[in-house]
Image (cartoon, rainbow, N blue to C red):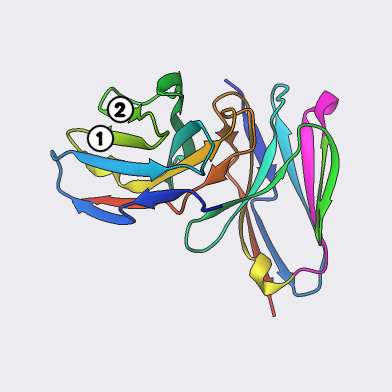
Amino acid sequence: KAGVTQTPRYLIKTRGQQVTLSCSPISGHRSVSWYQQTPGQGLQFLFEYFSETQRNKGNFPGRFSGRQFSNSRSEMNVSTLELGDSALYLCASSLGGAVTKQYFGPGTRLTVT
Amino acid sequence: GIQVEQSPPDLILQEGANSTLRCNFSDSVNNLQWFHQNPWGQLINLFYIPSGTKQNGRLSATTVATERYSLLYISSSQTTDSGVYFCAGAQKLVFGQGTRLTINP
């Protein structure tokens, strides 16, 4: 089975712009979760989608949003980018959500200048 | 919310040595997982271990759910074991700050 894929792998954006990241889960997995990793805050949960519905949300501002499509692929969007949004964004797929084994993608490294 | 503490924060060992990494939770979790992050940022799931003991080659893990801690054992370390090890758990998968392991040849 193919693993979790994320596109793009690297991205450079300017403050104030918006960005969309994509995640394709392992075939058969219906849950996709998103995480932000920064040197200062570590790994933080953004949100989880299961069968196109957001099931859980972390403590991030409304500029961070996501969605999931009927084929379980997920996108996350960050609007009005700030310098502090520079981070590694990781998505994970699983059969049943965060309470089941999580399989992570390679991540998208976002740099905001 | 749940707090996750990992110790030690850093560990430097020679190839062939054994090590024990610890993870403490402030509240009970039913989905404790251990991950290894390689230098390129990829997180690999090592164990899904809500309770009990599991082994996979040179790695093993034990979770004592009633006392809210988990241990990861690495035996006969190799340079490829270097990286950051994270434990995580809870509904919104709370991560610890990680243990950075460096294995010198």
CA distance separating discs 1 and 2: 6 Å
* Element type where label 2 sits in the image: strand
Query: Mark 1 or mark 2: which comes first in sequence?
Result: 2
Query: Amino acid under label 1?
Result: Val
Outermost residue toward the bottom? Answer: B105
The magenta region covers B64-77
> So how many labels did they put on this image?
2
Residue A72 lies, in percent from the top left, at 42, 33
- Badge 2 local density, few (<14 within 10 Å), some, or many (20+)? some
The numbered dot on residue B63 is none
* Element type where label 1 sits in the image: strand
Q: Quadrant of residue B32?
A: top right
Instruction: Please give the name of the residue rendered at 42% of the width and 20% of the height, measured from the top-left corner.
Output: A54
Residue B60 lies, in percent from the top left, at 82, 52
Instruction: Please give the name of the residue rendered at 35% of the width and 47% of the height, measured from the top-left corner.
Output: A87
Q: Which residue, given by chain and number where applicable, does mark 1 sit on? A: A78
Q: Nearer the viewer, residue A46 or A99?
A: A99
Q: Is residue A68 located in the magenta-colored stretch of the structure? A: no
Q: State yes or no: discs 1 and 2 in contact (Cβ < 8 Å).
A: yes
Q: Is residue B83 left or right of residue A44?
A: right
- Badge 1 local density, few (<14 within 10 Å), some, or many (20+)? some
Q: Which residue, given by chain and number where applicable, does mark 2 sit on? A: A65
Query: Amino acid under label 2?
Result: Ser
Residue A25 lies, in percent from the top left, at 47, 42
Q: Quadrant of residue A46?
A: top left
Q: Is residue B75 located in the magenta-colored stretch of the structure? A: yes
